[in-house]
Amino acid sequence: MSLLASCAKPQKTGEYQAVKVPCLAIPADLTSPLTKPKISDSFTYGDSVALNAELFGLLNQANIDRQAIRTIEAQRQ
């Protein structure tokens, strides 16, 4: 049977300090209002198709902005 021995000094345990991390500001472009498309007085069926495409684009951009805000909020925690 062999025994191990050492003459090294015991290690100090580390000290921990709380560090405040600055809050991430939500960029203004994520919270700025979206501009709504203008509807002319002579609105046709063809115009409504183009309007729907534009509205879907705005909806998609709003969803992208919301996801970015959720990501920023998750990083804060």
Image (cartoon, rainbow, N blue to C red):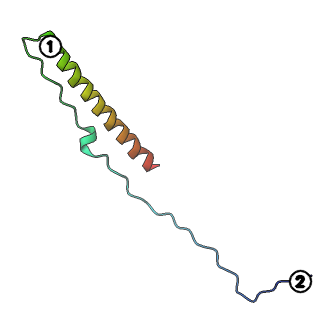
Q: Quarter of the image holding residue 54?
A: top left
Q: Would residue 18 be found to the left or right of residue 54 on screen?
A: right
Query: Split into 4 quadrants, where in the image is the N terminus?
Result: bottom right
Secondary structure state at the residue bearing disc 1: helix
Quick one: label 1 or label 2, which is nearer the N terminus? 2
Q: Quarter of the image holding residue 14?
A: bottom right
For the residue marked with disc 1, what is the amino acid? Gly
Residue at coordinates 12% horizontally, 18% vertically from top-left? 39
Q: How many marks?
A: 2
Residue at coordinates 36% horizontally, 41% vertically from top-left? 69
Figure check: 28 above or below 19:
above
Residue at coordinates 46% horizontally, 63% vertically from top-left? 19
Figure check: 34 above or below 9:
above
Percent of width and height locating residue 42? 7, 11
Percent of width and height locating residue 59? 29, 27
The CA distance from mark 1 to mark 2 is: 92 Å
Which residue does the numbered mark 1 point to in the structure image?
Answer: 46
Question: Of all residues shown, which one is farthest toward the bottom?
Answer: 7
Q: Would residue 21 be found to the left or right of residue 6 on screen?
A: left
Secondary structure state at the residue bearing disc 2: loop
Which residue does the numbered mark 2 point to in the structure image?
Answer: 2
For the residue marked with disc 2, what is the amino acid? Ser
Q: Mark 1, residues whose alpha carbon is within 10 Å: few (<14), some, or many (≥20)?
A: few
Q: Would residue 14 be found to the left or right of residue 8 on screen?
A: left
